[in-house]
Image (spheres, rainbow, N blue to C red):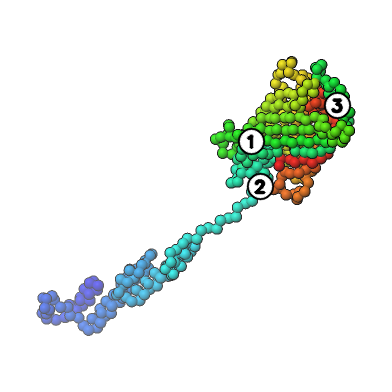
Amino acid sequence: MYGLLHNADIPTRQNATSTPPTSDATGAAAITAPPAMKSLIASLFIALCAASTLATAQNVVQPQAPDWQHCSALNGDDSARLRCFDQWAAQHTSEPTPHTEAASANNLAADTDAPATPKKPAASAPAAEPVVITMTAPEEHNCKNPRFSELSRFWELEAGSDCGTFGIRGYKPISLSVIGSDSVNTQPDSSLADHRATTAIDYNTTEARIQVSVRTKIAQGLLTQNDPLRRDSLWFGYTQQSNWQLFSADLSRPFRTTDHEPELMYIYPTDLNLPGGWRWRYSGLSINHQSNGQPLPLSRSWNRAILMAGVEKGSEFQLMGKVWYRLPESASSDDNPEISNTIGRAELTGIWSPDKTNSFGLTVRNSLREQANGSIKLEWLRRIGGNSGDSNQPNGLRFHTQLFSGYGDSLIDYNRRRTVLSVGLSLVDW
């Protein structure tokens, strides 16, 4: 601007007269020019000012991130100030505002003056779990709970299948049956001379049989006291079997023989997975006494130490094994010295339950000697009454059929082989 003014003064100085310059109040020299020149200079000055203002306005309204305070400061140009606010508003409305359930809840709380409560995520529905018989303990202990397996309920192997001590439970089936045999021991004898009946009695080959068998748990947690799930136990059991000559009226229907069998049993829950889907559920030790309670010459008795174990596969198959050692007796007190060679030294029992109505059993005894004496027993138990599919009542009254062949159908017959068929009713683990 100063250069333009300076160049404009040159022709004025060349054509002007030598009139002395005048001074203003400040003493500065006044520059004089023709009116046309002054109008030209003023127009150029206004154009330059407008260009400078436009450039300044453009620099102001095009910031990268304008804010409302910066726009408010543009008081010199209303149009630039308005454009600045328009840009600021456009920038903030174009940015997406995240919308969440928490934000909506806060906005609603702000509108209603209520405290915001964040919405909890919906819990997914739990997947259905298969029923697996394992050592777990439900809140209620119940030795009849069908959630547990047959062997777990029978021996109360787990905390959930535990019914406490000194309750009376069934052991072997409590049964009443009619039996028919291929022969009957009318004059029992033994290898000892003074153990032979002096006279023969004409017994009937058809008779009734009564068996009563109960047990009670007298202690538990002896070795598993620190285990929250498993329960070892000590049991006392008693079994009595009587052969009753119910159809021998001429003999006044006597009891031909009665066997007594008290037993002390310790059961430990082993719980070990075996090949083929089997589980080893328990191991045990028993002290067993069996006698017929008769004086000589019909006295028969023995004492055994028995090792036992049980395995199962699902709810259909159970397999129980026993092996025993006869406790020695003196020759003067031994009424049946060869009993281990006839009745046997080991026993294996298998049970198959294809449904909740029927059970089939097989029991094999063997002497474990070259001359393999022993016995075999087949039986079928069918549930009677109620809904046969009711799993809440796994035990109860059964129709019972049994076929026995071998030695030891009763203790008086320990050395006599016979075949016996029995049909009747049994109460199983009531």
Quarter of the N terminus within the rendering: bottom left
Residue sticking out furthest to the bottom: 35
Asked if residue 334 is positioned above or below residue 383 in the image, the reply reads above
In the depicted view, which residue is nearer to us: 401 or 209?
A: 209
Asked if disc 3 and disc 1 are in contact, CB closer than 8 Å, the reply is no
Residue pictured at 40% horizontal, 72% vertical: 86
332, 73: nearer the viewer: 332
- Packing grade of label 2 (10 A; few <14, some 14-19, many >=20) is few
Q: CA distance from mark 1 to mark 2?
A: 32 Å
Rendered residue at 70%/38% (across/down): 170
> Where residue 233 appears, x then y in whole percent?
62, 34
Q: Amino acid at mark 2?
A: Pro
Q: Are marks 1 and 2 in contact (CB under 8 Å)?
A: no
Q: Quote the CA–CA distance across marks 3 and 1.
A: 37 Å
Task: Please report whichever mark, 1 or 2, sits nearer to the chain's N-terminal start.
Answer: 2
Of the numbered discs in the image, which one, if any, rests on residue 185? 3
Query: In which quadrant of the rendered view does residue 29 lie?
Result: bottom left
* Left or right relative to 272: residue 291: right
Q: Amino acid at mark 1?
A: Lys
Residue corresponding to mark 2: 130
Give 5 or 136, whichever is nearer the viewer: 136
Looking at the picture, how far across and down is residue 158, in whole percent? 62, 39
